[in-house]
Image (cartoon, grey):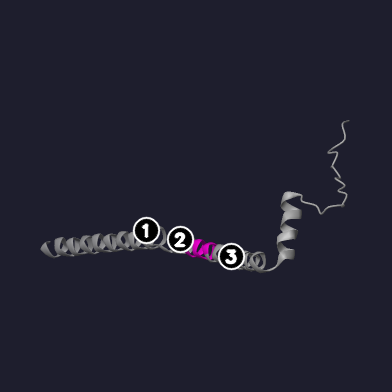
């Protein structure tokens, strides 16, 4: 009978060790997927980095455009005139300005 007790005890220990191993494995997998440094967090950070890179590219393009405009305004009188006409509504002497207004949506 002592032999049966030992074999039962060994079997119980194996089951407990297997269960503990499975629980540890599941915890590791859950941590690897959903943890602070998990796969889902990594994917989210990658998307965020791509969006920020696109935003940087757009801002660099806008910056280059503005630098070109600044250079033109400092050196080209036609650029200054164009800006004064577009933004401030200036006209030359003797010019006639026609304002076309959008009537908006028609009332029913």
Q: Nearer the viewer, residue 108 or 23?
A: 108
Residue visible at 86% across and 48% down in the picture: 97
Q: Position of residue 25 (x, y in %)?
A: 33, 63
Which residue is denoted by mark 1 in the rendering?
Answer: 36
- Which stretch appears magenta? 46-52
State the separation of the CA atoms marked 2 and 3. Answer: 35 Å
For the residues labelled 1 and 3, say whether their Cβ atoms are less than 8 Å apart. no
Q: Nearer the viewer, residue 61 or 22?
A: 61
Magenta residues, dominant SS class: helix
Res 104 quadrant in image:
top right
Q: Position of residue 9 (x, y in %)?
A: 17, 61
For the residues labelled 2 and 3, say whether their Cβ atoms are less than 8 Å apart. no
State the separation of the CA atoms marked 1 and 2. Answer: 9 Å
Residue visible at 41% across and 61% down in the picture: 33
Residue visible at 72% across and 50% down in the picture: 88
Left or right, residue 42 beside residue 102: left
Query: Label 2: how many residues lie within 10 Å, few (<14), some (14-19) or many (20+)?
Result: some
N-terminal-most mark, 1 or 3: 1
Query: Element under label 2?
Result: helix
- Give residue 40's mark: 2
Q: Position of residue 72 (x, y in %)?
A: 67, 67
Query: Label 1: how many residues lie within 10 Å, few (<14), some (14-19) or many (20+)?
Result: few
Which residue is denoted by mark 3 in the rendering?
Answer: 63
Image: 83 above or below 106: below
């Amino acid at each position: 009978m002592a032999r049966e007790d030992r074999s039962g005890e060994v079997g119980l220990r194996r089951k407990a060790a297997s269960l503990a191993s499975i629980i540890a494995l599941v915890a590791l997998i859950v941590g690897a997927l959903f943890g602070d440094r998990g796969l889902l967090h990594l994917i989210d950070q990658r998307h965020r980095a791509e969006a920020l890179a696109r935003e940087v590219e757009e801002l660099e393009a806008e910056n280059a455009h503005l630098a070109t405009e600044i250079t033109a305004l400092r050196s080209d009188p036609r650029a200054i005139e164009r800006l004064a006409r577009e933004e401030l509504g200036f006209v030359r002497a003797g010019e006639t300005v026609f304002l076309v207004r959008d009537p908006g949506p028609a009332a029913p």
